[in-house]
Amino acid sequence: MVIKLLEGTQGIGVVLAETYQAAKSVIEAFRGLNANILVQEYIKEAGGSDIRCFVIGDRVVAAMKRQAVEGEFRSNLHRGGKAEKVKLTPEERLTAIRAAKIMGLKVAGVDLLRSNHGPVVMEVNSSPGLEGIEKATEVDVPSRVIEFLEKNSTKGTNRDRIQA
Ligand SMILES: Nc1ncnc2c1ncn2[C@@H]1O[C@H](COP(=O)(O)OP(=O)(O)OP(=O)(O)O)[C@@H](O)[C@H]1O
Ligand SMILES: [Mg+2]
């Protein structure tokens, strides 16, 4: 299983426990430090890769696959992982859109793992970064966000207080 410190980022505090004994020791150690942790099934068959889906509204506008360097299971770009554009299956697309919707997010970065039992959601980010996904997919993501806002905003009730 994978044991994660909730405060962690860039793969720091993400631990792979390969045996029951190792998992027990790591969980005990983290609990001893009063750390907040999350435990997930290890998706070995993902082969050190994950998929970032950038969701806007009810669409995935860009998706990239991040692949970890040899001998590493964490695909974080900060750890040397490489990103490339990826084509999603309809099931992956739907999973990402549903995950964002369930979290109440109109803009989200949904991270999926390709497991033997279909796509699984690893994480949903409410303020996803733009740089990596833009580079990998060449999609102008910020413009897509702005277009979405323009299309979906309703006329506000606030008035300009400055009197002409
Ligand atoms: N359950 C899992 N099974 C297989 N690989 C995993 C699993 N959880 C995480 N990984 C790998 O480890 C990497 C880092 O994990 P995760 O994204 O959860 O933490 P983080 O990057 O440190 O946190 P954040 O994304 O919030 O900054 C993932 O990108 C993925 O490649
Ligand atoms: Mg991550």
Image (tube, helix red, strand yellow):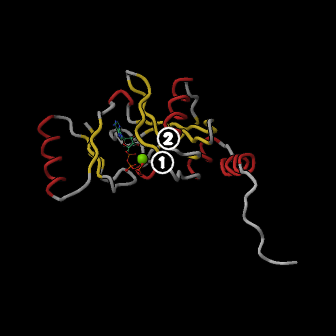
Label 1, residues with CA under 10 Å away: few <14, some 14-19, many ≥20: some
Whether ligand 1 has any atom under 8 Å from the Cβ at mark 1 is answered as yes
- In the picture of the structure, the residue carrying the numbered disc 1 is 125
Asked whether, in this view, residue 95 is left or right of residue 155, the answer is left
- Which of the two residues, 63 or 102, is positioned nearer the viewer here? 102
Residue 110 disc label: 2
Going 48% across and 38% down the picture, which residue do you hit? 102
User: Between marks 2 and 1, how big is the CA–CA gap?
Assistant: 6 Å
- 121 vs 139: above or below: above
Mark 2 and mark 1 residues within 8 Å of each other at the beta carbon: yes
Whether ligand 1 has any atom under 8 Å from the Cβ at mark 2 is answered as no
- Name the amino acid, label 2: Val
Residue sticking out furthest to the bottom: 163
- 21 vs 135: above or below: above
- Which of the two residues, 158 or 7, is positioned nearer the viewer here? 158
Residue 61, image x and y in percent? 64, 38
Please identify the quarter of the rendering in which residue 94 is found.
top right
Going 14% across and 52% down the picture, which residue do you hit? 29
Nearest to N terminus: mark 2 or mark 1 = 2
Q: Give the position of the C terminus as an image quadrant.
A: bottom right
Residue 133, image x and y in percent? 58, 45
Q: Give the position of the N terminus as an image quadrant.
A: top left
Going 73% across and 51% down the picture, which residue do you hit? 154
Label 2, residues with CA under 10 Å away: few <14, some 14-19, many ≥20: many
Asked whether, in this view, residue 84 is left or right of residue 3, the answer is right
Asked whether, in this view, residue 151 is left or right of residue 71, the answer is right
- Name the amino acid, label 1: Asn
Please identify the quarter of the rendering in which residue 3 is found.
top left
Residue 24 disc label: none
Secondary structure of the residue carrying tag 1 is: strand
